[in-house]
């Protein structure tokens, strides 16, 4: 069976669980698309002018100089609460008691056929220029939620380790059972690479970083490596979670309910690997791959997307029959630990309308200057800006909740447990969830959101002066348009997930690098304050612009009389996803009747238009009660898109319009239940059933908008 996952949008670079992806646009003259300088209201002026790169740099420095792995730094959570309190937010820590694991020791040995051995260090180089790389308590390389165990066997190169890659290996007749998988980072979420290896009877997984993903910024192309230049330091290792994120995010021992001390606990093994895994740098993976050269099928002949990388002297052979073996050991300490979500509140006058802004605080390393603390630094500056506005007597109409999540890195744990605790209230009151994870890892702005937020998300860009490759006379909208100008579809990989899948409008934002920008050393020791100041965002100027953007977006969400959500903007998107679905069905040769879906979209369009008309009348007449009624419809209608029982095989994921792909983890699939019944389950009857359920959900959403 062919698995084609719909990539309706370019994968951006902002979410912390995601990797670098390229948006390729020639560096021609940037066309002005908006008024310059932007026209601002007095309130907007106050908010914008409050932003200061120097103080953002100071917050960044604080966050990036101490161990803040999940569940290990209550001081930092409290510091965040204190800062927010200082700026007028009533702040507290919400605690959860969750299953995590921490690294104890690991090792890897390559045993050549001739009896020689090679023993990778599994460590990143200490750099004199970058102080936090030498901290005595620096975090070892490991995978979160990885399995404690040893494996010793021949190994096979499995490409990026998606289901299609394993299908290709089986078609080539490669024996997988009992072997170790050597997989390349990129594409799918890393936990799914381990899952696929495990599902194929393999007994361990080693995942390496490859400079082939670094565009033109490589040493092979003459660019100096960090710390001397913007190319990747060869010893860079990507840590990260191996939870099976597309099945369930959050504490794997409490699926669907909150984790408190004394909560009943489920066996986590359905979403955590049962074979050991290790991450490794490209320089230490090179001998492993070279030992496979000449054995099995070479990379060109395997002929799979993303199979061949750019490690010198490597032909990316599958490697069966090499005679070389790996001996790996991974020891983790399984633990129940307290985690701390910092929550800061300013009550609005309308208590039943709440806007949540979230960023996670935990990092895999001492630094975390991009992931996630560029976002953390921005949130403090945002709080400061609202305190400046409050001095004028301003009060929000809607309640603002700031959240600094813990344990995002293990699998969105802090945000998922918080949602599970507060879901009845959130379902009633949440207007939208605004996420900022990696605020800045490069210069290119990137935004993904639910369709009802597209309009406000793009219009606010016109109000932001955005620094871009030396130019200071452009708005964020000009730059974003130049770089492709598309609002992405939300998949997963950051904390918006739990909210989105309960039918809450959501947006994720940030700025990342392209193929000619400094390589972002994701989840490595080099995602440090030093890297940020030298390469990522010297002067913290992009931090400032992204922070101003989030701040104005939040301001309008909580201040505007007419809630800036546009339900009618779902119509066009539902149509685009429909066409993609038709193509998928055509490619599968199944006969599936979509007439019910067509009718549902058409009904949605009718009621969405009625909603828009009635709201315009209410505004015209100055009828504030009717405006409130319409605002509440805009807040509520998207709850209709969710299915109580969840998508097939994954109860947690309830949104029937978009979800992370089962075998991608990050990238979205649209009409996911219908699409994956075809592409994943090859079950046309199931697909037909979900055409019915998806259509019903669209009708529920439509009926909420009905006058
Ligand atoms: C921005 O300024 C640069 C010179 O600094 C100029 O070349 C460019 O034309 C200006 N762009 C716009 C859109 O005005
Ligand atoms: C918590 O983080 C702060 C700020 O980075 C750091 O100074 C402190 O040492 C950390 N605490 C622990 C227990 O590591
Ligand atoms: C064994 O093979 C490896 C890889 O080709 C080589 O580097 C090493 O020198 C060889 N050892 C001996 C003893 O021949
Ligand atoms: C890399 O550089 C070459 C030569 O300058 C250019 O043609 C190519 O488009 C660049 N690649 C990317 C991905 O930008
Ligand atoms: C890969 O295999 C194909 C087919 O056997 C061959 O034509 C090609 O030269 C090989 N490439 C390498 C790098 O070994
Ligand atoms: C690689 O696969 C594509 C289809 O996926 C096919 O069109 C192409 O001919 C193949 N190339 C080789 C060298 O086999
Ligand atoms: C696993 O491997 C490590 C490292 O080689 C070794 O110290 C340990 O004894 C092994 N454990 C078991 C249970 O074999
Ligand atoms: C905000 O509103 C909640 C709910 O009505 C109330 O419990 C809380 O005390 C209020 N907080 C402040 C600071 O007024
Ligand atoms: C669909 O049918 C066409 C034409 O009969 C065939 O070439 C193609 O392989 C089929 N696709 C699938 C997925 O079965
Ligand atoms: Zn992150």
Image: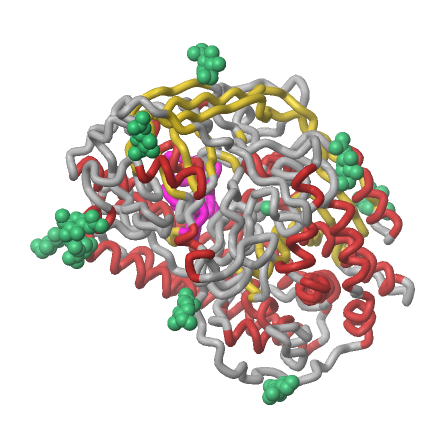
Please report the residue visible at 59 percent of the width from the left and 35 percent of the height from the top.
413
The quadrant of the rendering that contains the N terminus is top left
Q: Is residue 423 visible?
A: no
Residue at 46% x, 57% y is: 218
Quarter of the rendering containing residue 7: bottom left
Q: Is residue 40 above or below residue 167?
A: below
Horizontal arrangement in the rendering, residue 587 relative to residue 389 (left or right): left
Residue at 38% in and 41% down: 286
Please state which of residues 552 and 284 is positioned toward the viewer in this rendering: 284
> What's the magenta region?
642-668
Q: Quadrant of residue 9?
A: bottom left
The C terminus - image quarter: bottom right
Vertical arrangement, residue 373 with respect to residue 94, above or below: below
State which image quarter holds ligand 2.
top right
Q: Is residue 664 magenta?
A: yes
* Closer-to-camera residue (506/410): 410
Q: What residue is at 70 percent from the left and 66 percent from the top?
A: 541
Q: Is residue 454 above or below residue 315?
A: below
Side of 318 relative to 261 (left or right): left
Q: Position of residue 666 (x, y in %)?
A: 45, 47
């Amino acid at each position: 069976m062919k698995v084609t996952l719909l990539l309706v949008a370019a994968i951006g670079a902002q979410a912390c669980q995601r990797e670098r992806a390229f948006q390729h646009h020639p560096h021609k003259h940037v066309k002005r698309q908006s008024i310059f300088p932007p026209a601002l209201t007095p309130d907007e002026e106050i908010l914008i002018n409050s932003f200061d790169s120097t103080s953002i740099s100071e917050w960044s420095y604080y966050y990036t100089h101490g161990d803040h792995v999940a569940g290990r730094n209550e001081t930092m959570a409290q510091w965040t609460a204190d800062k927010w309190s200082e700026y007028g937010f009533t702040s507290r820590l919400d605690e959860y008691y969750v299953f995590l694991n921490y690294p104890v020791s690991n090792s890897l040995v390559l045993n050549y056929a001739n009896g020689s051995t090679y023993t990778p260090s599994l460590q990143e180089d200490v750099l004199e220029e970058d102080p936090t790389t030498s901290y005595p308590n620096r975090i070892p390389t490991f995978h979160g939620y990885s399995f404690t165990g040893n494996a010793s066997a021949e190994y096979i190169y499995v490409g990026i380790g998606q289901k299609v890659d394993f299908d290709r290996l089986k078609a080539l007749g490669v024996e997988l059972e009992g072997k170790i998988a050597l997989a390349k980072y990129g594409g799918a979420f890393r936990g799914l690479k381990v899952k696929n290896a495990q599902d194929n009877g393999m007994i361990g997984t080693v995942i390496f970083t490859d400079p082939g993903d670094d565009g033109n910024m490589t040493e092979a192309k003459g660019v100096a490596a960090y710390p001397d230049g913007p190319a990747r330091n060869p010893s860079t290792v990507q840590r990260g979670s191996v939870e099976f994120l597309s099945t369930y995010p959050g504490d794997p021992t409490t699926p669907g309910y909150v984790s408190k001390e004394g909560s009943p606990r489920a066996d986590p093994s359905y979403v955590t690997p049962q074979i050991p895994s290790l991450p490794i740098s490209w320089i230490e993976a090179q001998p492993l791959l070279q030992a496979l050269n000449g054995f099995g099928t070479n990379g060109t002949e395997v002929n799979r997307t993303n199979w061949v990388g750019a490690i010198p002297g490597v032909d990316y052979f599958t490697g069966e029959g090499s005679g070389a073996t790996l001996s790996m050991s991974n020891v983790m300490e399984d633990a129940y630990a307290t985690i701390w979500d910092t929550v800061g509140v300013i009550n609005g006058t309308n208590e039943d309308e709440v806007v949540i802004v979230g960023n996670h605080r935990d990092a895999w390393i001492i630094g975390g200057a991009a992931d996630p603390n560029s976002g953390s630094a921005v949130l403090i500056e945002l709080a400061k800006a609202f305190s400046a506005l409050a001095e004028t007597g301003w009060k929000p109409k809607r309640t603002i909740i700031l959240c600094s999540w813990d344990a995002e890195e293990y699998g969105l744990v802090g945000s998922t447990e918080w949602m599970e605790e507060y879901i009845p209230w959130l379902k009633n009151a949440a207007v939208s969830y605004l996420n900022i994870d990696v605020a800045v890892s490069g210069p290119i702005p990137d935004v993904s959101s639910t369709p009802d937020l597209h309009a406000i998300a793009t219009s606010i860009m016109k109000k932001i002066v955005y620094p871009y490759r030396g130019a200071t006379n452009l708005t964020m909208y000009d730059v974003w348009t130049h770089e492709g100008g598309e609002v992405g579809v939300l998949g997963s990989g950051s904390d918006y997930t739990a909210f989105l899948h309960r039918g809450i409008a959501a947006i994720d934002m940030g700025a990342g690098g392209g193929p000619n920008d400094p390589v972002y050393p994701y989840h490595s020791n080099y995602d440090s304050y030093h890297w940020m100041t030298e390469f990522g965002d010297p002067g913290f100027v992009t931090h400032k612009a992204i922070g101003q953007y989030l701040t104005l977006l939040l301001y309008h969400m909580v201040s505007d009389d007419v809630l800036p959500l546009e339900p009618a903007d779902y119509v066009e998107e539902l149509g685009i996803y429909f066409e993609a679905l038709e193509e998928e069905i055509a490619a599968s040769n199944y006969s599936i009747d979509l007439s019910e879906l067509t009718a549902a979209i058409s009904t949605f369009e009718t009621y969405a238009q009625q909603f828009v008309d009635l709201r315009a009348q209410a505004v015209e007449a100055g009828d504030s009660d009717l405006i409130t009624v319409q605002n509440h419809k805009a807040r509520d209608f998207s709850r209709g898109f969710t299915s109580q029982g969840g998508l097939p095989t994954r109860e947690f994921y309830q949104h029937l319009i978009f979800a992370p792909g089962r075998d991608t983890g990050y990238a979205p699939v649209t009409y996911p239940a219908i699409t994956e019944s075809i592409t994943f389950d090859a079950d046309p009857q199931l697909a037909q059933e979900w055409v019915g359920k998806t259509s019903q959900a669209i009708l529920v959403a439509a009926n909420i908008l009905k006058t």
